[in-house]
Amino acid sequence: MKEKKSRFETEVIHAGYQEEQYHGSLVPPIYQSSTFTFSNAEQGEKRFAGEDKGYIYSRLGNPTVKILEDRIAMLEKGEAALAFSSGMAAVSAALSDLTKSGDHILCSQGIYGCTFGLLQLFKEKYQISHDFSAMDSIESLKKEIKPNTAVIYIETPINPTMKLVDLEMAVNAAKERGIPVVVDNTFCSPYLQTPITKGCDVVIHSATKFICGHGDVVAGVVVGKKEWIERVSRTTQKDMGGIMSPFDAWLLLRGLKTLPVRMDRHSENASKLFAFLKHHPKIDTIYYPGDQENPDFSIMQKQMRQPGGMISFSVKGTKETAQQFMNQLKLIKIAVSLGDPETLIQHPASMTHAVIPEDERLKMGIENTLLRLSVGLEAWEDIKEDLEQALEKI
Ligand code: LCS
């Protein structure tokens, strides 16, 4: 593409790809090759020494994967990006690089279950401790930062409670101590929220979700400063090896093209379903960033384009009531993951967040009656009718 500043909806289709360099192929080619030949021994030596630009071996970089990395870096307004085989590979590489034994991670009061598991592993094996923080005021956040705090780690919206953290506030708290603020932006995608524009240092995605958008790839991405990304690429990623395959990168490039169109529809459907669920007599509490009565509503307005496609709610009754409700659904699928065209429902206490001990889980707001709905792209009336008939039966 000729050099020109474009809008998000255009960049998501064109950024990072110059078809002239690929025989005019409209769609980026898949470089399904594990290795790359050198024209002579000296060139091979120079490539390894970093003196000759060019590909070596697909664990160290691949042209199809690079197109995806460049596109995501531009969408997130970051300098560079690195693609991984899963969201957890991205989270673990970023946190391994930013911490060492004896360090401390200050984390939002709620994170994805496997990220919780990773923090446990860091604590037990490498003496890297962590604390959870409500992150609801700059004063309290500053007090919770310890001399050995090496990272402030935030999910916003938090999986699955949909609580929000004010990113500018977190950046201001971290700034004077120079602590990197790392944001898991999975629930928003770069279309709804760009943490780097708020001063955050690193953005992580489970690209499995809205970025892919079709439920057919498990993948992750990390975005940050060019120098840091290059270091992670040369060290943590190269040596731990959680790289993305060229075919998965190609599928993600394909899925990304419709991200804004999909996100608009996810958000529109979710807001209509929220209006239906909000005052339903069988529903106890509902958690949705677009709820004007939600204390985080002003944070949503400040840092998100739209409230997004995720809603959590607890049904009146017990865990068994919640399970009975799920079992009555006909169109909505019972499955973990999110951001797919299909509407999905899951029970965090027994599924995505089951690894978290109950007392800790309840502190995070994950009650036994809580359900998480990933609103799909179907006709919203069909989703509503399915919820309605299942609610009638409990
Ligand atoms: N970060 C967040 C916020 C996530 O929700 C997930 C996965 C990950 C990281 C890890 O990404 P993965 O390795 O799966 O690509 N969340 C899931 C969920 O809520 N249901 O199934 C997976």
Image (cartoon, helix red, strand yellow):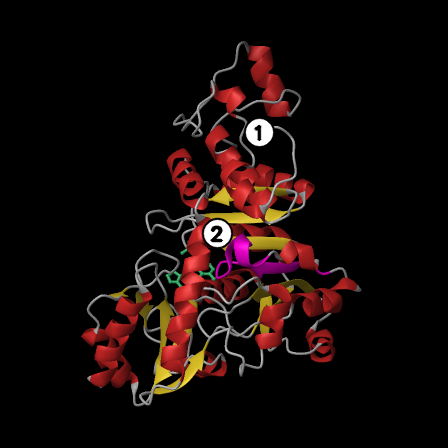
Displayed quadrant of residue 179: bottom right
Image coordinates of residue 240 in percent, x first then y, are 49, 43
Q: Give whichever of 378, 98 is nearer the camera.
A: 378
Residue at mark 1: 1
Residue at mark 2: 260
Q: Residue at horizontal 33%, vertical 63%?
A: 336
Side of 240 where 353 appears, left or right: left
Q: Earlier in the sequence, mark 1 or mark 2?
A: 1
Q: Let me know if residue 200 appears in the view.
A: no
- Using a 10 Å C-alpha cutoff, classify the residue at mark 1 as few (fewer than 14 neighbours), some (14 to 19) or many (20 or more): few
Image coordinates of residue 136 in percent, x first then y, are 64, 78
Residue furthest right in the image = 176
Read off the magenta span. 179-193
Image coordinates of residue 367 in percent, x first then y, are 40, 83
Image quadrant in which the C terminus is located: bottom left
Does dot 2 land on a helix, a strand or a loop? helix
Q: Is mark 2 within 8 Å of ligand 1?
A: no
Residue type at the position of mark 2: Pro
